[in-house]
Every structure is written in structure tokens, then in C-alpha cells.
Amino acid sequence: MTLLEVETLAREAHAAQSDKAGRPYAEHLRAVAEGVRARGGDEEQIAAAWLHDAVEDDALSEEWLRGAALTDRTKDVVRALTKRPGEPPEEYAARILATPGALLVKEADLAHNADPARLAVLDEATRARLERKYAHMRSLLGLTAEEARGEGS
């Protein structure tokens, strides 16, 4: 699949979803893909960025991913970034660190998720909970806040 085909598919798959602030979910996917590109990611990583939440959110199935016309590396990154129900954050982080190319995509994901402007529209309790969650994941992945924002990578 070309990057344009992947983007179109991801936008369609997530069309009915919105983020915690009520924005179209495709805006998050675009921001992560752009973040990967800005961090020097390659086309396989950019494709994975567009698809990073697709299986986790049930927008696309693991069966679809298995048969998709994507490189094995792109599929591996998508699988690495797919949180499993009940999975401890430590196991999730270990899988990301063990999968070539996945950390860069997760950096871009965390950068957008933790964007102060994006968090500012949430209620205080939700914002504080998410800030703790993202900081913990950065710690598990060995990232500083600056790296997650793309300032120190």
C-alpha cells in the first residue's frame, strides 16, 4: 500500500471516532504521522503511525493486518504499539523497545497525546491522570519530555 492509501484507510477506519477532547480522531493520526516524519522516520514508520491505534481501537482487525499489503516491519510496529487488554505498562514498553522502529512512532504518539494545548481542554482530573500516565510511559521507554516532544531526539 502507498502512504496515501494507508492514510485514506486509517481515516475511514477511525471516521466515527473522536478523541477525549471531542476532536476527530484522524487529527491525532495525522499529528503522529507528521511527528514521525519530523523525527526522520521512514515510510514504513509513517504508515505504522497512521495505523498505530487501528487494531487496539477495533477500527481494523488483526486478521486484516495479517493480510494487508504492508511490509512486515510496518506490521510489527503496529503490533508493538497495540496495547493488549490488562497488559501492564512495563510489558507494553518492553515490546516497543524490542521492536525495531516502534520507539520513534511511540515518541510521536506521546508528543501529541501530551501536548499541553491538547490537554488544556480536558477537565483537571482527566488532564492530571493522563499527564501521569504519559510521564510514566516516557520513563519506561527512557525518553525525556523534550524527546517525546521532538526537541531532544
Image (cartoon, grey):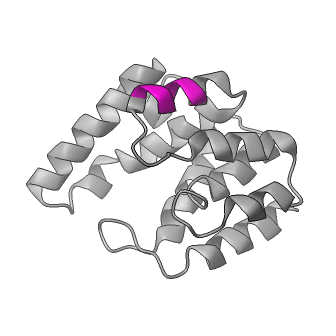
Asked whether residue 49 is drawn in magenta, I would say: no
Image side of residue 106 versus residue 21, left or right: right
Tell me which secondary structure the magenta stretch mostly adopts: helix
User: What residue is rendered at 13% in x and 60% in y?
Assistant: 123
Q: Is residue 42 above or below residue 135?
A: below
Q: Is residue 6 above or below residue 18?
A: above
Q: Is residue 146 above or below residue 47?
A: above
User: What residue is rendered at 50% in x and 45% in y?
Assistant: 83
Q: Position of residue 130 (x, y in %)?
A: 26, 45
Asked whether residue 94 is drawn in magenta, I would say: yes
Q: Position of residue 64 (x, y in %)?
A: 76, 65
Q: Position of residue 100 (x, y in %)?
A: 72, 27
Q: Is residue 136 above or below residue 51?
A: above
Whether residue 74 can be seen here = yes
User: What residue is rendered at 56% in x and 60% in y?
Assistant: 29
Viewer-side residue, 140 vs 2: 140
Residue 73 lies in quadrant: top right
Quadrant containing the N terminus is bottom right
The span shown in magenta is 90-95
Q: Residue furthest left?
A: 124
Whether residue 144 can be seen here = no
Residue 153 lies in quadrant: top right
Q: Position of residue 55 (x, y in %)?
A: 60, 59
Image side of residue 10 versus residue 111, left or right: right
